[in-house]
Image (spheres, rainbow, N blue to C red):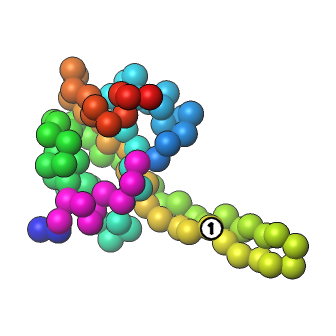
């Protein structure tokens, strides 16, 4: 089993993800090689909560440029984790 802190990279902080917190849905960027069961186990271990569902999606890198310099943002994997009723992650609640 992978270390849970290697599976969860960082939380996604945006208006859209904070709107989902009211419904018990939290969004994280995760290791692209991890699967749904590894993500579920990692969130349950790190935050001591009960996970009822995990939805994942791949994110593409967007083209960016400044003057003649061209590049792309990083690509990755995003996981939306749904918690059991009454559960919450305190890290997000201090907004």
Residue 94 figure quarter:
top left
Residue at horizontal 67 percent and vertical 64 percent from the top: 62
Q: Residue at x 37, y 38 (%)?
A: 26
Q: Is residue 13 visible?
A: yes
| Residue where numbered disc 1 is placed | 73
Closer to the camera in the image, 45 or 91: 91
Q: Nearer the viewer, residue 30 or 36?
A: 30
**Magenta residue span:** 3-11
Q: Is residue 54 above or below residue 52?
A: below
* Towards the viewer: 82 or 64: 64
Question: Outermost residue toward the front?
Answer: 94
User: Can residue 38 be seen from the camera position used here?
Assistant: no
Element type at marker 1?
Answer: loop
Q: Is residue 4 magenta?
A: yes
**The C terminus sits in image quarter:** top left
Residue 77 percent location from the top left of the image: 43, 61
Image point (49%, 42%), residue name: 13
Q: Quadrant of the N terminus?
A: bottom left
Label 1 Cα neighbours within 10 Å, binned few <14 / some 14-19 / many ≥20: few
Q: How many marks?
A: 1
Residue 2 spot, x, y in % from top left? 17, 68
5 in the magenta segment: yes
């Amino acid at each position: 089993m992978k270390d849970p802190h290697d599976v969860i990279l960082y939380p996604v902080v945006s208006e859209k993800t904070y709107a989902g917190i009211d419904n018990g849905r939290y969004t994280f960027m995760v290791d692209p090689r991890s699967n749904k069961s590894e993500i579920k186990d990692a969130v349950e271990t790190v935050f001591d909560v009960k996970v009822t569902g995990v939805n994942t999606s791949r994110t593409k890198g967007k083209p960016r440029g400044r003057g003649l310099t061209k590049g792309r943002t990083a690509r990755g994997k995003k996981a939306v984790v749904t918690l059991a009723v009454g559960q919450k992650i305190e890290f997000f609640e201090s907004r």
